[in-house]
């Protein structure tokens, strides 16, 4: 069965620090990969997605993610975080052959202090 | 405005009292889905629907029912709620299940079962 692991459960950073959130998935076939963000009290919004092509994907608000197939990873990065990036971040994956189901990781809570 | 709406946003009820959480989308999306979000567990899919009159179980369907009589609506029914169904529930929709399975999420319904 597919699964998604986010090993960083809670990350605390100061503004301007660099961010990298880990995401690993367990599925050997072709996958579609997503990062969603949930700001406090709000619903989930799509940050970025990867289907095929360039493994370095750029999303909104300066976020990017790199798909490394050999490592089954899709880590999220941002060079310089802001206080407004405080949120919970979810990695999600679905198998290209069965896109009915989107499997989410357990989430990483990011707190950014001024 | 394109959106997914859920009602109610907050609900406190007692064990065994049937309840329905409504979900509606105005984007003519074919695919709709219900998730529950619990601390440390991320989002888990309860049920999904590929189109009108087509529904299927997700990862945690026990204790829930759904129906899809119209394209825009996908209510979640708890026939006999129990305290372990206390959670934050999200409805989501997308144009179709497929590569472009970017799901748009509703604002969430926080349910407490006493």
Image (spheres, helix red, strand yellow):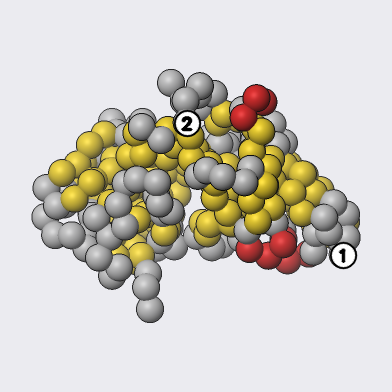
Q: Is residue A1 above or below residue A113?
A: above
Q: Position of residue A90 (x, y in %)?
A: 58, 45
Which residue is painted at 14% across and 59% down in the image?
B70
| Tag nearer the camera, 2 or 1 | 2
Q: Chain of mark 2?
A: A
Q: Is residue B38 above or below residue B31?
A: above
Mark 2 or 1, nearer chain start:
2
Q: Position of residue A62 (x, y in %)?
A: 72, 62
Q: Is residue A47 above or below residue A96?
A: below
| Residue, disc 1 | A114
Which residue is painted at 64% across and 51% down in the image?
A57
Q: Is residue B53 above or below residue B3?
A: above
Give the residue furthest to the front. A53
Task: Check disc 2: other Cα within 10 Å, few if <14, some if 14-19, many if 20+.
Answer: few
Residue A40 numbered mark, or none: none
Which residue is painted at 25% across and 65% down in the image?
B28
Give the residue furthest to the bottom. B1
Quadrant where the C terminus of chain B sits is: top left
Left or right: where does residue B7 sit relative to residue A32?
A: left
Q: Residue B9, can we see it? A: yes
């Amino acid at each position: 069965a597919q699964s998604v692991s986010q090993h960083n459960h809670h990350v605390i950073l100061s503004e301007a620090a660099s961010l990298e959130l880990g995401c690993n998935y367990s599925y050997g076939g072709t996958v579609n990969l997503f990062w969603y963000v949930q700001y406090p009290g709000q619903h989930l919004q799509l940050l970025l997605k990867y289907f095929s092509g360039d493994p370095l994907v750029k999303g909104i608000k300066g976020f990017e993610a790199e798909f490394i197939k050999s490592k089954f990873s899709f880590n999220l990065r941002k060079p310089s975080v802001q206080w407004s990036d405080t949120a919970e971040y979810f990695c999600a994956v679905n198998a290209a052959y069965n896109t009915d189901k989107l499997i989410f990781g357990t989430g990483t809570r990011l707190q950014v202090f001024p | 405005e394109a959106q997914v709406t859920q009602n109610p946003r907050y609900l406190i009820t007692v064990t065994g009292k049937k309840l329905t959480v409504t979900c509606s989308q105005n984007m003519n999306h074919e695919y709709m889905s219900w998730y529950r979000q619990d601390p440390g567990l991320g989002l888990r899919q309860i049920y999904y629907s590929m189109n009108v009159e087509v529904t299927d179980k997700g990862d945690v369907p026990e204790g829930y029912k759904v129906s899809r009589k119209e394209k825009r609506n996908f209510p979640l029914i708890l026939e006999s709620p129990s305290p372990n169904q206390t959670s934050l529930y999200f409805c989501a929709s997308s144009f179709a299940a497929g590569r472009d399975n970017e799901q748009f999420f509703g604002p969430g319904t926080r349910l407490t079962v006493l």
